[in-house]
Image: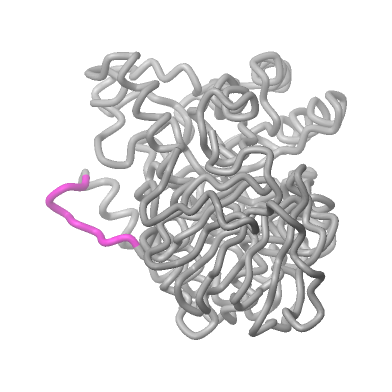
Amino acid sequence: MGINDGAALRIHNVRLIDGVGTEVVEDAVLEADDDGWITYAGPAAQAPEAPPHITTINGHGGTLLPGLFDCHTHLGVPSDRSLVEAALLTDPVMSVLRTTERLRRTLDAGITSARDLGGLPAGFRDAVTSGLIVGPRLRTSVGVISHTGGHADGTLPGGKDLGLDYCEIADDVTGVRKAARRMLRAGADVIKICTSGGISSAHDDPDDQDLLDDEIAAVVDEGLRHRGRPVAAHAQGRAGILAAIRCGVRSIEHGFGIDDEGCDLIGEKGAFLVPTLSTAFQPLDPRRTEPWRYQKKLRWIERTKENIAEAIARKVNIAVGTDAGITPHGQNAFELSCLVRLGMSPIDAVRAATSNSARLVGVQDTLGSLRPGYAADLILCTQNPLRDISVLSAPENITLVAQQGVIRKLTLTDRELSSASGQNNLHAGVRR
């Protein structure tokens, strides 16, 4: 399902950002073998001679980066219609097909790996892995565990239950253990819980604690007992953030109310913050937002920016996630612009979305870097994101996407893609 399935790959005439270091190679070559593993990535002057019959791409001065991660998506949730419409008015077959289209669009935006935290069945992960469909490499929580009236309770203010099958309600230690086991039985790679209320939930507030400490600890224990499955916590307010970190979760999702104590605890526990700043920088339209949600968002926008800016200044361990589904799908790299606006350097934003996100997901030995021995998951940007990080936000600037050396997207105009023997010339807009 790629342009060059089973072929070695060589990319030249590019600026190289490897995703780990701070040095940039201005005239670089990257080469990957037939199995999609990088064999060389460095200065063109030191590159080995190109072997015969290798697929060669002339990047014409573009920037080559590791494929980006989005560690907080909801690919099964539409960003262009309400949950009510999606749950009650959409044909199930159409839902599956639209999810498949979102996977494609997310990959085209340069996201080669994603962690989905609610609403994506494990079958989509398996379909991508087996090659039935194309999309980012996936880790999924399948569902979300919350208490009655908490953030993942799909009951509307009028009492109507949306019947969201990915929302698990549990109200005591035994209940959360059973809920975690159901998620693991359904194929979850990571367990998603709510330790605080939320902006988008009608019955609570971000400052409310959702699951209690002993319930959080029970879920963490279930994950440890099942091949060390990590736990991700929706934690917006301070109480939920501190409870989650104390009890051993791997990542704080959102973290809008994080303070000095929370920053210190993340460092002590080796946890990660995934701030999903795209939600804070998203335009707010009172005409299209429920009044209760609009008022909560107003109260939290500036608070969020101030707290996350302080966390960035303190060098808190940050991985990149967008909350796509709440924010638009296919514009995931906008999150890097948000980080930079709050004080992160462009190179650190790139590293947060590549090697550091790979560490969160547990694939740092094979993904997140353009170095020999790593998989050739990579993207080519027409411009230099270290000068203007926003260029990554526009999918049209991402002219090449490859996974394990297989080209998934190619929209190079007047650029070369050929075999060393002069055959296999492909032109603008090619995709298979």
The answer to whether residue 59 is magenta is: no
Q: Give, as a single range, the part of the protein colored magenta.
A: 282-289
Q: Is residue 22 above or below residue 31?
A: below
Give me the residue at 76% from left, 83% from top: 45
Q: Quadrant of the N terminus?
A: top right
Would you say 252 lies left or right of 174 here?
left
Determine the image quadrant of residue 144. Answer: top right
Please state which of residues 37 and 368 is positioned toward the viewer in this rendering.
Answer: 37
Find residue 290 and report its horizontal and vertical position in percent. 21, 43
Find residue 6 and report its horizontal and vertical position in percent. 68, 38
Q: How is the image coloured?
A: one colour
Give me the residue at 55% from left, 57% from top: 418
Determine the image quadrant of residue 163. Answer: top left
Please state which of residues 8 and 279 is positioned toward the viewer in this rendering.
Answer: 8
Prevalent SS, magenta region: loop
Number of callouts: 0
Q: Is residue 379 visible?
A: yes
Find residue 41 and report its horizontal and vertical position in percent. 76, 69
Give me the residue at 66% from left, 52% from top: 377
Find residue 199 and report its horizontal and vertical position in percent. 39, 48
Q: Residue furthest left?
A: 287
Would you say 390 lies left or right of 33 here?
left
Would you say 322 lies left or right of 372 here?
left
Please state which of residues 149 and 43 is positioned toward the viewer in this rendering.
Answer: 43
The answer to whether residue 283 is magenta is: yes
Q: Is residue 130 above or below residue 386?
A: above
Q: Is residue 236 visible?
A: no
Q: Quadrant of the C terminus?
A: top left
